[in-house]
Every structure is written in structure tokens, then in C-alpha cells.
Amino acid sequence: MNKKWLFSGLLLSVILFLGGCEPVTVLDPKGPQAALLKDVIMISIWTMLFVVVVVFVLLIYILVKYRSTKTASDYRPPIIKGNIWVEITTIGIPVLIIVFLSFVSVQSTYQAESVPEGFKDQEPMVIYASSSNWKWHFSYPEQDIETLNYLYIPTDRPIEFRLYSFDAISSFWIPQLGGQKYAMTGMLTKLNLAATEEAEMWGRNSNFSGEGFAEQTFNVNAVSQGEFNEWVEEVQETAEPIDEETFDELLEPGHLGQKTFTGTHLEFDPAPEEHGDHGDMNKEEMNEEDMEHSEH
Amino acid sequence: MEFFKQFAVPNPTPTIYLSMVAIGLTLIAVLAGITYFKKWGYLWREWLTTVDHKRIGIMYLISALLMLFRGGVDALMMRAQTSRPGNELLSAAEYNEIFTTHGVVMIFFMAMAFITALMNFAVPLQIGARDVAYPRLNALSFWLYFMGAMLFNISFVIGGSPSSGWTSYFPLAGNQLSEHVGTNYYMIALQIAGLGTLITGINFIVTIFKMRAKGMTLMKMPLFTWSALITNLLIVFAFPVLTVALAMGTMDRLFGTHFFTIDNGGMAMLWANFFWVWGHPEVYILVLPAFGIYSEVISTFSKRNLYGYTSMVVAIVVISTLAFLVWVHHFFTMGQGAFVNSIFSITTMAIAIPTGIKIFNWLFTMWKGKIQFTVPMLYSIGFIPIFTIGGVTGVMLGIASADYQYHNTMFLVAHFHLVIIPGVVFAMIAGMTYWWPKMFGFMLNERIGRWAFWNIAIGTCLAFFPMFIAGLDGQARRMYTYSEVAGFGVWNLLSFFGGLGLAMGFILIVYNVYYSARYASRDIGDDPWDARTLEWATRTPVPEYNFAVEPEVNTREPFWDSKYEGEKLFKEKITDIHMPNNSGQPFIMSSFFFVLGFGLVFSLWLLVYIAAAGIAVLLFYRSFEKDDGRHIHEEDVRETEREMGGDTR
């Protein structure tokens, strides 16, 4: 059964690839959230590799041993209904594996959703990231500036991205900083990220949003706090202010490259309110209605 | 002229014009051929009006294979476009239409039709029945599916195909962001085909509950019948959700409601939830019959009883329950928070447990067996390792936090293809090859079949394994192109070669049908595989009444035990057999549905009213029609049985 060896070989090369040489983007983290997810991914790969190996070994063994050409021509296979111990094993071990992975999943999901470990004592910097076909608008309310299709962020500071969309559902993703989250209309979602290394990275919308989707990308520059401050100062000195008219033009479907403005569009076109993530349904519904009225 | 403008496609290209010409010519050739060979009468009497579950099964099979090629060509075009960075074979608009149709055609019109084909053919035979419970409804199911599929397929040349993905997420699919009629086709064609599926679901539940042979208790049913029962229960519970979602989507698009729109209180997330509340059970609707087929095939060609029958049944039932409790994992990234995601993460991973039990039971069925490497068995064996890889990556995707990195990437694409191809397509080819002699009276060539298998198996691995790496490297799905610096090129090129392997395999299958039809022996007896269940206890090919005498059953493998343990299956004498009459109504009514659908797509209200009136008249007529069926007389049955060689009891 050379096919089985082919599978194992392919799998092995995948594993070697993941573990070795030049790491792929998701496994090359530049911040604590991406590093966390990398660990989770590697734990799950090794656990699942165990399952794969067990199944492959059993399959190859059975195929080699019980092929009809190897058995006597008058051999009549026995009737075997089942065996309680075998079934306890084939249920028990998978249950243990799933329990283990459930712990990993729940714990890491709570971690991935909150401010990264080690940054909890710092006030996060807020950046609004809103998508419109097929661009990303980044508003820095604290610094009072706005960029199109590129981000500057300071390292070693937690950043709270507040995401929403002007049209199609988009997904905000900077794989080297952490996982993605949807940006949608009429609702605000939050994503906590942080960079610990100075690096240039890419980010994109990963959720299909129509014709210009493939090019809906942006650049991310993680720089030191000092450098970041310099950049902010430079923008405030050189960039044009954003106004409603300019912004409406930006919202037209298309690609525009990178742009920089002072002020943010939030002043004349505020972001939707956050969707309460636990509990009070009535309050949520009211919020939604408020949002819809206020937005349009 | 103004009137005809609406039928133009939004992004016309030479490919589309060529397809128009090709479709036109094929249509003319087929019609002319039928006329020339004077086959209209035959076609009408034997096929268009048939209510025989075997013929309906065969028509489903042919349609499924046609759709497999339609969807397969789409897939090849996508792989060709992305095989090189910055390729300009297709524009973004074309690529979007193609991946959307690929998904819709493969899931709704290929996979669904394929499982329905095999359920139609095999389930009544496996339970020793003469037909399904509602034969005429069964014909209606098929024709509704067929008309839905045709309506969807003409979108390519009339008005434009949908281009917002097979999931058709709003608001992208809404009027504001998708102006052309493509999404109308999606909503309405799926509604019509879905109606057919829902009717099939009801029909088979009743058939399996009420029409089993004497002595066949639920726990003596063959595993394929068990899986068909649970699948149809899933259909009846899940499809109404799709029906409602599609109706709401249709109203948004045609009548200006605001269920899923950007403004005026629309909520796009509601569509995503509805879609996946149906969509996840749908995965199991497809894969459970496949599991049933593997159970039959592995047991037959290991010459052993199925290991752990009871745990297999329990596993199917548990899977079908969990199927409704995991839909949120399709959008962990929607921002519902860690608590909700944790719950759905655990339910998702829990599905691995019953699925694992099934894998081990298949392995233990082969243990101490006498394994014959026939073509159906090759697919079943190939399924185990590939599906295991697809399955364990599914567990990885089920970890909510990690999914934030896999979501919307090629990693996900690799996962679900490595589940659906071995889990559904392999099973369907295995089942088709396995039951082929019962359908047509000859066997498919084993040597060509093996070649096809190796092409398909290796092609699958080569096409989809590289996508795991491309996904982890950050390649989002549904991108029509990428830049050279992205570094995805090599993985996509490998995928393209894999796609060619798959194409080669499917071409070999078609060649095999031609070759075997021409050269294969017709003298194969009633039981060419030395099988175990009731469908092999009757003649080959199966006469219209299925069983001259209704079988009686005492064991789980009645036919095997009648061959080797001296059980007696047929105890009674041949008597007159009551059969349902043929009817043209299902075909005519479904044709009205086609017209209705077309009218709705383009808002041609006159057409809509006429077709709706036609449907109403037919429903009314049917309600008052008296049709008691007909009898095949005892002598005719004896005559047929004698001709097919063998004792007449």
C-alpha cells in the first residue's frame, strides 16, 4: 500500500514545514495574541497527529494482514458483534482528547478575547477600524488623526480596535498580531491586540465582500512609542483635515491607496454603539434601534 | 429591445458567448436526436412520467453526474486562475460568479442529488418494499429538483450568475451591493429544489417506518437504511429553516422588505445564523448516507458482519443531534464573545467522538476479515486516511481561539474539501459502482475503475493538502488573485495539478461507463459481489415490482444468512402485485414551477400569475383525482421471473 506511505510522507513534510525553516505568517507572531494562538495551533497539531498516526497504523496493519490474497481460500471470517472493552477504549480515549482540547479552547478563547497578558495594567489605545468597499479607514480619536489603508501602532501598548463596516461584512485580520474579527454595519465589535516587536506587517479583509475584495489590504507598521509620537506629530503638521464631503467620496466603492488626514470621520459620522455581549436583551434591542436611527 | 436588455449578462465575455452557443447547439442536437430516433413516446412513457423509485434514482444519478461536471469545470477554472500570481485568465467578477456557482452546484445539485439517487435506488430494495410510500410525490421531488437545477444553470447565460458566495451572505447579496439578478436565481432556484428535498425527506421517513419487510425491526435494518432514515429526519428538521431564510431573502430582493438590509433595521447576521442553522445539519445530511454506504461496502468486501452495529446506529443518532448544536462555529469571529464561542467550540469538537467510533468500527470490521480490493472497497479504504485528516483539522478549526486565525482562509477550504470529497464523493462513487449491476445489469470495469480511483485519491491529496499551508501563510479564500511577493504561488500551482488529477479521474469514470456498457458481460447473476443485504436477493436488473414475493426477515443480514445459514427469505406464493400508475403531473407541475421561478427572477409578473395558476389547477385536480393504481397479474410476474432465469416459487 504505497498510497499510505504517500499520505504519511505528505503529512510529515507538512509538519516539517510548519516546524522548520521559514515560518508561515500565522506561525510567525509579532505580538502576544498571535503567539498565544500559535501555541494553541501547535498543541492541536501534535494532539491530532497522535490520532492520525493511530488510525494510519491500524489501517495499514489490517490491510496487510487480512487482505484476501494473504488468507487461505477456505477461510471464513468469524462473526464478531462487538466487545465492550474495545468500545470503551475507542470512546474513552477520544473523550479524553476532546476534554483536553476543550480546556485549551475555552481558556485560550477567553484569553484571545481580552486584553493580552502582561498589558492589563495599561490603558489600551483605541483605534476605530471601519471598512467600506474595498478600503479600511483607521481613526485615532486620541491622536485626532485618520488614515486610509495603513496603520501605525506603538509597540508594547495594548490596542483596542473597534470594528464596523459601512457596507458588506468584512473581517479585520492582521495574522502576525492575532486573530480576526468581523466588521459589520450597525454594530461595533472589539478586538484586543498588541505588538511586542517592531515590524512591518500586512493586514486585510479576509471575508469576501465583492469585486475588489482581493485587494482590500493594508499595511501595519509597529514602531516604538517614540517613533509613533513623531509620526503623529508629522501627520498633524502636514496632513489635510478630513470633512464630510471628502469622506463621502472615500466611501465610494473602489481602491484608493494610502491617505492621511487630521481629525476623524467619527466627528460627523459616528460609529455605531457596541453590542452588549452579555445579558440584558431589552437593552440590546433598544441600543440597536438607537443605532439605526442615529446612523442614518 | 428595452425588454430584452434585462436578460443580458452583466459581465459578458467570450467564454459566456461560447457557452451560450454550446448550450443552444446541445439543446437543438438533443431535441433533434430524440425526434429523429422517434424516442419522444419512449421518453414520456418510461421516464418523464415514471413513478418507479429505481428510475427516479437513475434520473437523479444522471443529473448528479452532469452537475458534477458543471461544478468540476468551475473548480478547474478557479484552480487555473489562481495557479500563478497575478494571473489574468479570469476577471474578479467572473471568478466570483464561478466560485459561487461551484459551491451551489456541488452542494445542492450534485451532492444532494447523488445521495437522493442512491437512497431512491437502494432503500426500498434494502427493506424489501416494492416502492416508496408516495411514489408520485417522489416523482414530484425529482422534477422540482431538476427544474430548480436547470433554472440555476441558465443564470450563467441569461441575466448573470450569483456572485456573493454559496453562503450568499447579506448585505453583500442584497440589492444595494448585488444589483443584477444573480442572487434572485440563487434564492428562487434553491427554494424550488429545496421543496423537492423536503418532500423526499417526508417520503423516505414514512417509507422506512411503514414499509419494511415482515420481521425487519428497526435494529435489523441495514446501516445504509439507518443512515437514510436519520438523514431524512435531518432534512425535515433543517430544510424549513432554509425555506424561511430564502423566502425572507427573496422578499428583501423583490418586494423591498428589510430583513437583512444595511439600513432600516435590517440585520445581516440573522441571515448568517439562519443559513448555518440549516447549513451545518446539511453537512451531515450529505455525509450520513455516505457513512451508510461505507458500512455496507466494507462489510461486503471484508466478508464479515459489521462490527459494533448498535454503536454505529447510536453514533449516527448522536451526530444528527449534535448537528443542530454547532452552527455558530461557522462564524466564531462575529463577536459574540468568549462564552458563546466556548460552548459551540465544545459541541463542535464533541462530534469527533461519535465519528471516531465509526472510523474504528470500520477498521474492526476489516479486522479478521478477508479483504477484497474491489473498486467500491478502494474508495472506502481511501476514505479512511483522507477523511481522518479532514476530520482532525475540523477539530483544530473547532478550537474557537485558533479559528480566529483559520477562519476565511485556504486552511478552511482544505478542511472542508478533505471532509466532503472522501466523505461524500468517494462514497457516492463507491455506492454507484456497488449498485451499478443492480441498476443496469452489468458491472463497471474494475481496471479502469482502479485507475480512476488512484487519479481521484492522489488528485484530492495534491489539490487540498497544499491549501493548509497557504492558509496558515495567510491566503484568504475567495481571492481571485494574489501578488507574487505573497508567496502563495507554489502551493496554488500544486493545487492546480491536483485538480487536473481529479479531472482525469472523473473522465476515466465516464469512459468506464461507456466501455462497460459496450463490452461488459450481461451474465452476472443476481449477486455479483457475494453481498449480504436484501437488494441482492432479487433479480438483476431489478424488475419493476422489485420482489416477486415480499421477503421475510429474521436476521440483520438476511440475504447472507439465506445463502450460508439456510434462512428462508421468500415463503409465500406469487400473487397479483399492486403497483402505482405513472403520471405526467409531477413533470408538468414542476415545469410550471420553472416558469414561476423564471418570472420571479426577472419580476415578470404576468408569467408568475400564469404559472401560479397552473400549479393551483394541478393541485386542485390532484385533490379530486381517483387513482387506485394497477395490478401486475400473477402470470405476468411468473413469466418475467422465468425469463430472468430461476425458480418461480
Image (cartoon, coloured by chain):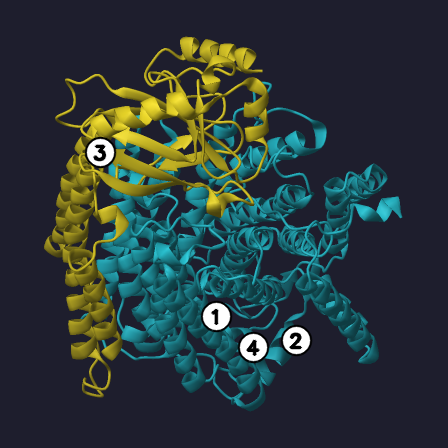
Which image quadrant is residue B463 in?
bottom left
What is the drawing colour of chain A?
yellow
Q: How far apart are marks 1 and 3 (CA)?
A: 55 Å
Give the mark toward the camera: 1 or 3.
3
Q: Quadrant of the C terminus of chain A?
A: top right
Q: Give the residue type at disc 4.
A: Phe
Q: Where is residue A45 in the image (x, y as percent from the top left)?
A: 19, 52
Q: In the image, which lettered chain appears cyan?
A: B
- Marks 3/4 same chain: no
Give, as a three-letter code, the residue at label 3.
Answer: Ala
Task: Establish whether labels 1 and 4 are both on one chain.
Answer: yes
| Whether labels 2 and 4 share one chain | yes
Single out the mark in the foreground, 1 or 4.
Answer: 1
Is disc 3 in contact with disc 4, using a CB cutoff of under 8 Å? no
Instruction: Residue type at mark 1: give it.
Output: Met
Query: Pointer 4: what residue?
Result: B440
Residue at the disc numbered 3? A195
- Image coords of residue B183 (percent x, y): 63, 42
Residue B330 falls left or right of residue B59: left
Q: Which residue is drawn at 45% across and 72% down?
A: B500
Residue B432's tag is 1
The residue positioned 32% from the left and 37% from the top of the image is: A220
Q: Answer with mark 1 or mark 2, whichever residue precedes in sequence.
A: 1
Q: Name the residue under label 2.
A: B635
SS at mark 4 in the image = helix
